[in-house]
Image (cartoon, rainbow, N blue to C red):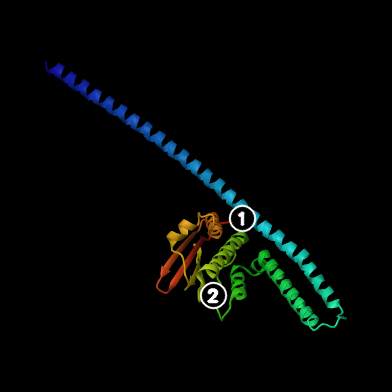
Amino acid sequence: MKQTNDDIRLLLFMGIAVMLSLFASILLIFIFFQRKKYQYQQKIQRLHQTQQNQLIEAAVRSEETERHRIAEELHDEVGAILSASKLHLQGVKINVIDKNNEPRYEKGQELLDMAIKQVRGISHNLHSSILKEFGLNEAIRHFVEKITNNDLIFITTDLDDSYTTQANENDISIYRMVQELMNNILKHARPKKIHITSTYNHDALNISIFHNGKGLSHAQYEELKFNKQGLGLKAIQTRIILLKGEVSFNHKPEGYYINISIPRTITI
């Protein structure tokens, strides 16, 4: 009788062990397939992100190529035509006695001079020659100098000169973002003061634009960047995604801050 009970007990233990082993095997198989599924999903996500970055990069490069083409046309064709027009005007002899002829002639020369300077300025801006030759900080300073009007708006900079170009394409994208943000501020915020600062460390380049006008909260930015009318903000977001950076809009008692952070190691 005792032997029978021992046999039953042994069979019971063996059955439990087999069931536990079976359960453990099923659990391991489940975990294995879940891990494979997760790895597959991660692979698909990385592939999707890579494709998205390639599309954004192509769009940005296409934009810069188009800017370069326009810059060359403005400089080589339109600029030459305007210069030739000025030469023709200078060769005109005023034979008709008319008190309005001389001021009209002088005004025509003045307008042509202005047009030539504007075309050269646009060409220079599109070509980003200062950016390529002297770097991001000098390009920002030059841009600020062009748009500053001390009677209407006071713009200052405090840029970290320890920053050196890691990739020229990155600097072009960062410069375009600063330009777009400044244009939006001047157009919509109507501030009296703007201050641009930058700090650079081993991890990231951080740029902050402060102004005391009418600004955006980050929630408003998140809403407007998907708006068809907010093409400038959408362009900024596109560049931020490509650079794997961050942008934030903040309001403090003294005014509004736009903060941009670009990782140092990112190249496009």
Q: In this view, does 136 lie to the left or right of 89?
A: left
The answer to whether residue 242 is seen in the rendering is yes
- Asked if residue 106 is positioned above or below residue 26 in the image, the reply reads below
What x and y, as percent, mark residue 27? 34, 32
**Residue 64 horizontal/vertical position (percent):** 65, 58
- Helix, strand or loop at mark 2: strand
Mark 1 or 2, nearer chain start: 1
Could you say which quadrant of the image residue 111 lies in?
bottom right
Residue at the image position 79 percent from the left and 67 percent from the top:
81
The x, y position of residue 18, in whole percent, is 28, 25
Q: Nearer the viewer, residue 236 or 201?
A: 236
Residue matched to label 2: 157
> What secondary structure is found at the residue carrying circle 1?
helix
Locate residue 123: give its quadrant: bottom right
Disc 1 packing (10 Å; few <14; some 14–19; many ≥20): many
Toward which corner of the image does residue 147 lie, by quadrant?
bottom right
Q: Nearest the camera: 201 or 134? A: 134
The amino acid beneath tag 2 is Thr
Contact (CB < 8 A) between labels 1 and 2?
no
Q: Mark 1 points at which residue?
A: 60
* Residue displayed at 50% across by 63% down: 260
Q: Is residue 184 above or below residue 146?
A: above
User: Quick check: 156 left or right of 65?
Assistant: left
**Callout count:** 2
Q: What residue type is labelled 1?
A: Val
Which quadrant would the N terminus be assigned to in this image? top left
